[in-house]
Amino acid sequence: MVQENHLFAANLIFPLFIVDGDNQKVEVSSMPGIYRYSVDNLLREVESCMKLGLKAFDLFPAVEESLKDKYATESYRKGTLYLRAIEAVKKEFPEACVVTDVAMDPYSSDGHDGIVENGEILNDETLEVLGKMALAHAESGADIIAPSDMMDGRIGYLRETLDANGFSNVSLMSYTAKYASAYYGPFRDALGSAPKKGDKKSYQMNPANSREALIEAQLDAEEGADFLMVKPGLPYLDVIKLLHDNFDLPIAAYNVSGEYAMLKAAIANGWLSEQVILETLLSFKRAGATSILTYHAKEVLEKGWVK
Ligand code: PBG
């Protein structure tokens, strides 16, 4: 009766890795229980999640090295793996909520989220690539587009591009406060998307800063974001709370790959009990997030911890 916060299936978004081919289901070595699926197996995975009441999915592609280039052209090519996956999920499960990731890194031969020239990121030139990518996702049936690139001005640019093409009902979940974090390691293993040179510190946020997140959030809100996301989650609960207290937009938290790997490793060793999973997810609700992207989404429903 007096419990202040509850976690529901509706709060959860399940990130899923996809790969080309048939009948593929390959475990990510640093993320036990998490797999890269070919589209046929992705549909079966989505089906079993939907039966558990999990309805929102965020797709991430593992792209063959030979398809990558400086301008990430594979990201919006007609018939590419990612677009086929969106279409297949929406066709078979129209009531599923498909969140798509807009960023160049899985398709970039430089492994960066922007176009690289002379060791620097070209912000405004990158927006054009992101615009083509977002439009291709919307045309394939995406419900929510989540730009994870951290280029300046991309929310306004994408909103205009989507509206001008008849997609004003497609939402934007902005990675508003995305930190230059070492917690993304297992994700980059899963996709083979680590930067070939340098780091992402010129566009992702400094882990020492929280007030800067207010500037990012203000810009995103003015440019038309529908959600503000904080990423990673657990080390940045203060930032989730800060954005929640200062903005009326829904707040999302990304419980990232390294946070997942950390708990799974400790549980596998018998150093922590499985209860830490629910405790962690509840902390995001307490801090003010309504939407939680987490690799634990399916297991907490399977175990009956969340309904
Ligand atoms: C890149 C992107 C990253 C994640 C989601 N989108 C990694 C990065 O910025 O290098 C990380 C997610 C995770 O670690 O679970 N656009």
Image: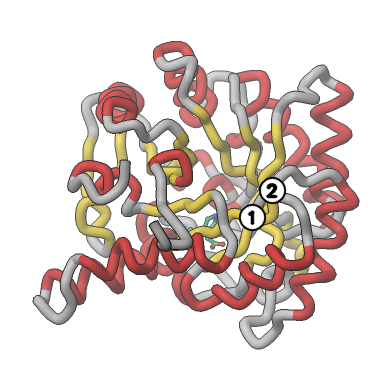
Q: Is mark 2 within 8 Å of ligand 1?
A: no
User: Toward which corner of the image does residue 51 lie, by quadrant?
Assistant: top left
Quadrant (top left, top right, bottom left, bottom right) of the C terminus: top left
> Seen from this angle, which residue lies furthest top?
91
| Crowd tier of the residue under label 1, counting other residues whose Cα lies within 10 Å: few below 14, some 14–19, many 20 or above | many
Left or right position of 265 against 285: left
The tag earlier along the polypeptide, 1 or 2, is 2
Q: Are marks 1 and 2 in contact (CB under 8 Å)?
A: yes
Question: Residue at label 2?
Answer: 227
Q: Which residue is mark 1?
A: 251
Residue drawn at point x = 58 percent, y = 43 percent: 101
Residue 247 vs 17, above or below: the answer is: below
Q: How many marks?
A: 2
At 42% from the left and 54% from the top, the residue drawn is 6
| Viewport quadrant of the N terminus | bottom left
Q: Nearer the viewer, residue 205 or 217?
A: 217
* SS at mark 2 in the image: strand
> Looking at this view, is 283 or 95 the one in front?
283
What crowding class fits label 2: few (fewer than 14 Cα within 10 Å), some (14-19), or many (20 or more)? Answer: many
Q: Does the image show residue 198?
A: no
Examine the image and state in which quarter residue 289 appears. bottom right
Please, is residue 178 above or below residue 190 in the view? below
- Residue visible at 88% across and 23% down? 164
Q: Is residue 45 left or right of residue 173?
A: left
